[in-house]
């Protein structure tokens, strides 16, 4: 098995499924589950994400619930890095710190364990999709409050019309597919 480079079209591109009006009218939901269900596409996606993230020489991957876990954990495993979750409110059992933010649909609060990041850690934040950037910005604020440095963000999908990229001012932004 070889590691795929980002120069060829990604298998994931043909697999991502548009679901109109989910979870609310007017939202075009990008369903990434067919990418997970295709072994070659999944491996290629993780390989390409991992290679681009490795270039940022992070100490840790932080993944955002829940689809950020699906990509963040395999990347962390492949790069030999620790992984820490940022979750929706009320899911984490230990002491947490929280950030509230506005989502493309509604508002939300995310939290992480107080020991999720070591002071001085170089952190890459991973999620499946960049929309308005609110979720990733909240995750970045948590990382910084815990003493980490956000050296980058990585997403499989970017919805460019929502200009989330403009809100992420802390590090390099990796996105594999832009719509
Ligand atoms: P945002 O905070 O606006 O950047 O939203 C990003 C988060 O919401 C990610 O965790 C995505 O999984 C989810 N999300 C937002 N919009 C969509 C969409 N159109 N399709 C799929 N997921 C979305």
Image (tube, helix red, strand yellow):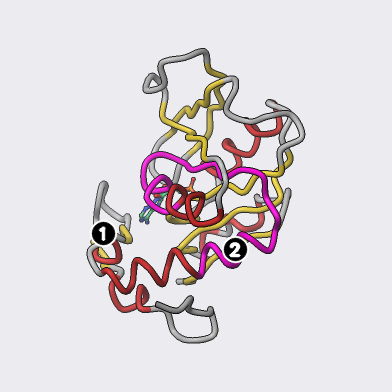
Residue 42 pos. (x, y %): 34, 66
Residue at 47% x, 50% y is 77
Q: Is mark 2 within 8 Å of ligand 1?
A: no
Q: Quadrant of the C terminus?
A: bottom left
Residue underneath mark 2: 174
Residue 151's label in the rendered image is: none
Circle 1 Cα neighbour tier, 10 Å, few/some/many (<14 / 14–19 / ≥20) = some
Farthest residue, direction top: 95
Farthest residue, direction bottom: 8
Residue at 46% x, 63% y is 156
Q: Secondary structure at mark 1?
A: helix
Q: Nearer the viewer, residue 68 or 54?
A: 54
Residue 153 pos. (x, y %): 60, 53
Q: Is residue 43 left or right of residue 34?
A: right
Which numbered disc, 1 or 2, marks the residue that appears first in the sequence? 1
* Residue extent of the magenta highlight: 48-71
Residue underneath mark 1: 33
Farthest residue, direction right: 120
1 and 2 marks in contact (CB < 8 Å): no
Residue 99 pos. (x, y %): 56, 26
Q: Nearer the viewer, residue 31 or 27?
A: 31
Above or below for 2 versus 129: below
Above or below for 177 versus 141: below
Q: Secondary structure at mark 2?
A: strand
Q: Is residue 151 left or right of residue 36?
A: right
């Amino acid at each position: 098995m070889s590691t795929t480079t980002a120069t060829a079209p990604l298998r994931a591109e043909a697999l991502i499924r548009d679901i109109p009006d989910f979870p609310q009218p007017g939202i075009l939901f990008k369903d990434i589950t067919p990418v997970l269900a295709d072994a070659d596409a999944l491996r290629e996606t993780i390989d390409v994400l991992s290679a681009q993230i490795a270039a940022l020489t992070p100490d840790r991957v932080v993944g955002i619930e829940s689809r950020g876990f699906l990509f963040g954990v395999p990347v962390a495993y492949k790069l030999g890095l620790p992984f820490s979750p940022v979750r929706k409110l009320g899911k984490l059992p230990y002491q947490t710190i929280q950030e509230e933010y506005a989502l493309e649909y509604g508002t939300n609060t995310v939290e992480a364990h107080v020991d999720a990041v070591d002071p001085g850690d170089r952190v890459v934040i991973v999620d499946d999709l960049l929309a308005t950037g609110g979720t990733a910005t909240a995750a970045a604020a948590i990382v910084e409050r815990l003493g980490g440095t956000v050296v980058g963000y990585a997403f499989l999908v970017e919805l460019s019309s929502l200009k989330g990229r403009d809100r992420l001012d802390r590090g390099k932004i990796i996105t594999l597919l832009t719509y």
